[in-house]
Amino acid sequence: MVRIAHERISGLFALAERAAGSDHPELADRYVRLARRIGMRYNVRLLPEYRELYCRDCSKFWVEGRTVRTRLRRGHRVRTCLACGRERRARSRAPKRVSSTGTESVFRPVPREEGVLAGSESEGAEEEPSEDEAEEP
């Protein structure tokens, strides 16, 4: 029964996605409500990718710009349902870089040879003459 419930839920979300782009967006909301009821009846959790597609308060299928507004605030993604006003917050996943020392850092250290000041004359470093200048006496 659980396998059949998963199949029906995934089919309903596929229908909801198709209906949201058509002339009948209210059908998408109906499909989401049915999928949630099937999940509750058979005690089946919805997949995480399905949980991001609807409002948990009013079961509205979210279409970016039409039924949901997404904003980034202080490292969180805030999605606001435009039908009922409920907000859902989730951490925004910024890529973290780990340096060779093991500490987390977004910036990598630039060696002195690659830096802007590497060839400055204030350090006493002399420039090597190019091939054209070396041939002329």
Image (cartoon, rainbow, N blue to C red):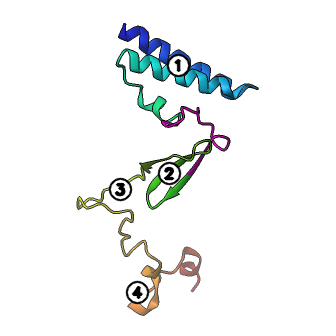
Instruction: For residue 100, say whether it is visible.
Output: yes
Q: Name the residue under label 1.
A: 34
Distance Cα–Cα, label 4 vs label 1:
75 Å
Q: Mark 3 points at which residue?
A: 97
- Callout 4 amino acid: Ala
Say what secondary structure mark 4 lies in.
Answer: loop
Within 10 Å of disc 4 (Cα), the crowding (few <14, some 14-19, many 20+) is few
Q: Mark 2 points at which residue?
A: 78
Q: In which quarter of the image is residue 100?
A: bottom left
Q: Does the magenta stretch include residue 127?
A: no
Distance Cα–Cα, label 4 vs label 3:
34 Å
Going from the N terminus, do you reach mark 4 or mark 1 first? 1
- Callout 2 amino acid: Val
**Total of numbered circles in the picture?**
4
Within 10 Å of disc 3 (Cα), the crowding (few <14, some 14-19, many 20+) is few
Which residues make up the magenta segment? Answer: 55-70
Say what secondary structure mark 2 lies in.
Answer: strand
Residue 125 circle label: 4
Q: Are marks 1 and 3 in contact (CB under 8 Å)?
A: no
